[in-house]
Amino acid sequence: MKNTIKTTCPYCGVGCGISALVSDKNHQVTISGDPSHPANFGRLCSKGSALGETIELEGRLLNPQAYGRDTSWTEALDLVANSFIKTIEQYGPDAVAIYGSGQLLTEDYYVANKLMKGFIGSGNMDTNSRLCMSSSVAGHKRAFGSDTVPGCYDDYEQAEMIILIGSNAAWCHPVSFQRIRAAKEANPTLKIVVIDPRRTSTCDIADLHLPVASGSDGVLFNGLLHYLHQENTLNQAYIDAHTEGFSKALNAATNSSHSIEQIAAQCNLKVEDLNHFYQWFASHEKVMSLYSQGINQSSSGTDKVNAIINCHLATGRIGKPGMGPFSLTGQPNAMGGREVGGLAHQLAAHMDFSSTDDIDRVARFWDTQTIATKPGLAAVDLFDAIYDGKVKAVWIMGTNPAVSMPNANKITQALQRCDFVVVSDCIANTDTTALAHVLLPAQGWSEKDGTITNSERCISRQRALFSPAGSAKPDWWIITQVARRMGFEKAFHYQNASEIFCEHAALSGFENNAEQGLRDFDISAFAKISQQDYERLQPIQWPVNQAYPQGKARFFDDGQFFTRSGKAQFIAIKPKLPVNLPDKDYPLILNTGRLRDQWHTMTRTAIAAKLNQHKPEPFVEVHPVDAQHYNLPANTLAVIESLWGSMIARVQVTDSQQQGNLFVPMHWTNQYASQGRMGVLVNPVVDPVSKQPESKHTPARIKAYQPVWQGFILSRRELTITESEYQVKIKGEQFYRYELAGVSLPEDWRSSVQKNLCSANAENTQWQEYQDSAKGNYRAAQIINRQLETVIFIAADNTLPDRGWLTSLFAKMQLETQERMALLTGRPPVGVPDVGTIVCACFNVGEKTIQAAIKEKNLKTHQEVGLCLKAGTNCGSCVPEIKALL
Ligand SMILES: Nc1nc2c(c(=O)[nH]1)N[C@H]1C(S)=C(S)[C@@H](COP(=O)(O)OP(=O)(O)OC[C@H]3O[C@@H](n4cnc5c(=O)[nH]c(N)nc54)[C@H](O)[C@@H]3O)O[C@H]1N2
Ligand SMILES: Nc1nc2c(c(=O)[nH]1)N[C@H]1C(S)=C(S)[C@@H](COP(=O)(O)OP(=O)(O)OC[C@H]3O[C@@H](n4cnc5c(=O)[nH]c(N)nc54)[C@H](O)[C@@H]3O)O[C@H]1N2
Ligand code: SF4
Ligand SMILES: [Mo]
């Protein structure tokens, strides 16, 4: 029996709707975009499309574990509850903490937050959103009095100008990016400006790319405010009627931006480019400023957010169609997390610890005497407190801090020192689960059931497609079970997610009115929603209350804000440099970020072979001049070092990078790469207001890594390889690929290989071998029953063949004689095409295939390539690369 279930994607904050055709019998699902969902109207990106390949049971955490052994739920839950109780009795409530995630569902998040802040009585519930959205939250709060995203996706089509600031939306919010691309195609006068030190794929649709100096956006937007004033393009009527603090903000802007030339010099931009940008902003009414981690992840991220918002307030461009500042949220439910109060300074339902009225109100609603009354520790401080032994028990849910936190080696040490570490995850082996005393198996996407909120405040259902793997449980269930065991039965009586949603909705409307203080977040229309209606819930943008029963697309259309005076606040910005600047020992700036086809720490996306093709190995982008200066030829390995740690990555030489800057992807962990965990390098500096870490700017240095041998192994089975210092594991279709390098040679490759690597010396095994000890070359292939089992290529000088053709042989039931004979050359026999690196993950089309087609058929546009090879016609994320090939 097959049936179609509507759900949502568990990756980025675009929040796409999915139509899942489920076959329960063989645990399979066919994924397509939900044409009726307002976030994507049927479109999906490469990650969303590959979800069906990530639901396998292998690698899942299936049972609760305590101290390395499988145990029952009862024992595990008792252990967690008792350990927390004991710690609190002995050291007080602030000795325990929860570290959650924007990947939890709203219902999970709500009960975790309620447990810690409402009943344990500590503010120590923080989340990975601290690393992600907290500067936006703080900026919103300062300007609007509330954490409100004013606009919506519909604005993309109505805008006359869209600015993408510190956002690589082409890779990170692909469906929104495609929608903006389509808007531009339909309306070529739509101006698009990208502000990013790197020339990313997002620049593909840009009329103007401003490659700003890392960290200089504050100067740029202060300069814009000053310019708008000079050009007399401010909306004085709006400023007078609806805002406060303008003259101070303008003074500060004037002080930091004397002339266009000075701003251009500080931002490392061409004067004419800067002029264009400022003129365009001045001359277009409907301007959207989309911003993401290039703004937020900074030691002055909150100021940068406000510098952007200032320009919108000063022109009155907010709350109306096609205009406004728009924070692109990262995680699928970062917004939901903010709604429930998941950050340590927040309380619940957009109330926080800054108001005793709020604390009293939430205490009455929750009927608790033990509510926390002050903010808890934010992520970096929290892990410092764990390291220092002040926090003695921590429960980590749905996040992988051993990888994603700055100064990640210290995080590992903190967890090693901690008396009691609980981790809830759906995956068994992660860098963080490795440090847990108790592991709790959570239901993952396709099993769990609840709601999430996307970037445009749209609440959608995520629905279960399958019965849970092993004894995995919903996060909300796990938390409520522990809460009951801690003595809070009455407050955690829920039988299902919809009861939690109702309570959350009721709290959002509780004493939410003009007399007692109006709050933006109000979904009280759902306070009594029936289980049935919850099941059927359609995507809807909050607020959803008596005034707006059908939701509301935009906030602030009436010029009313959630500050005490009802007026929006300008913030006077004095632009600051990043805290740690390059010096003679660490002369380069290390920037970090995302790749198109991986999600964060790869626990799910790396399961889908398709998603590992685009960028298989950790790499570092280096400008050609730097590459020459540091003697780093393309495709060699390099060691990158900071004061905090080091990593090894493959060199990519590219002028899309600025001289003096390095970029490494954030994704690799110890599970996939022996030396690829970039979090160990990142400086643990935070923004003083938002406490968000400065993940985009760490002083670093780079040098060649000089192995005595390099090589790769392709194997049908997963292997344990001990011979190499540098090692990357890549899952392919029916094979595993290992990229290897080492500074010491094994005594003898032959015996090492036969002993350690190929225990399956089954019957019908054939070996081919080639050894040139003088040159340090070794090649071998193992064939079992005429099927390729393993190939090994080792070379002292790294002259190794492309992996493409060899990997394609694993799909074959039997090798042809010709192919067998060509194996140790690593190259296809004459007449067989080599497809090269996969460019289009959706249709598996390789670089060489595209190049050949372009040449032979004289193709001119990416549309023509699409017609010919289908490449780029599904999710569209590879279009920039196809264009580059053209
Ligand atoms: N494929 C994929 N998509 C994702 C995710 C993923 O893991 N993979 N994660 C999701 C999450 S949680 C998030 S938060 C978002 C993040 O989405 P983005 O913020 O778009 O992604 P990043 O790559 O982290 O950073 C964006 C850009 O900021 C630039 N930048 C660095 N320093 C500066 C600066 O000083 N000024 C400016 N203007 N720009 C700068 C970087 O060069 C980078 O290109 O992506 C979401 N979507
Ligand atoms: N240097 C640098 N560091 C960064 C960033 C950067 O740009 N540069 N970006 C930062 C940002 S914006 C973010 S959002 C973070 C992300 O960093 P993390 O949150 O650490 O990364 P994830 O891999 O998403 O971790 C999610 C974990 O939850 C598990 N999981 C998935 N679904 C569920 C579920 O339903 N329940 C439970 N209990 N577990 C589940 C996954 O298997 C995985 O182990 O990284 C931050 N760190
Ligand atoms: S853009 Fe891609 S990753 Fe983001 S929600 Fe949509 S399908 Fe998922
Ligand atoms: Mo994020």
Image (tube, rainbow, N blue to C red):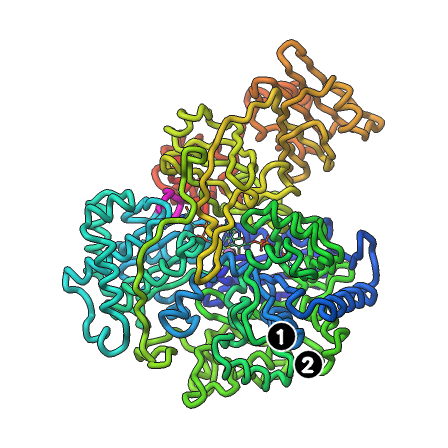
Residue 91 x %, y %: 70, 67
Image-quadrant location for residue 229: bottom left
Q: How many marks?
A: 2
Location of the N terminus (image quadrant): bottom right
Within 10 angstroms of label 2, few (less than 14), some, or many (20 or more) residues? some
Give residue 838's position: percent from left, percent from top. Answer: 52, 37
Q: x%, y% of residue 539?
A: 51, 72
The residue closer to the viewer here, 522 or 459, is: 522
Question: Identity of the amino acid at label 2?
Answer: Ala
Assign a secondary structure to mark 2: helix
Residue 64 found in image quarter = bottom right
Q: Tell me which segment is drawn in magenta.
A: 197-204
Residue shown at 51%/39% (left/top)? Answer: 643
Q: Position of residue 759 (x, y in %)?
A: 81, 29
Is residue 354 found left or right of 603 in the rendered image?
A: left
Which residue is labeled 1 in the image?
114
> Residue 145: within the magenta?
no
Look at the image and say whether residue 200 sits in the magenta stretch.
yes
**Label 2 lies in ligand 2 vicinity (Cβ under 8 Å):** no
Q: Amino acid at mark 1?
A: Lys
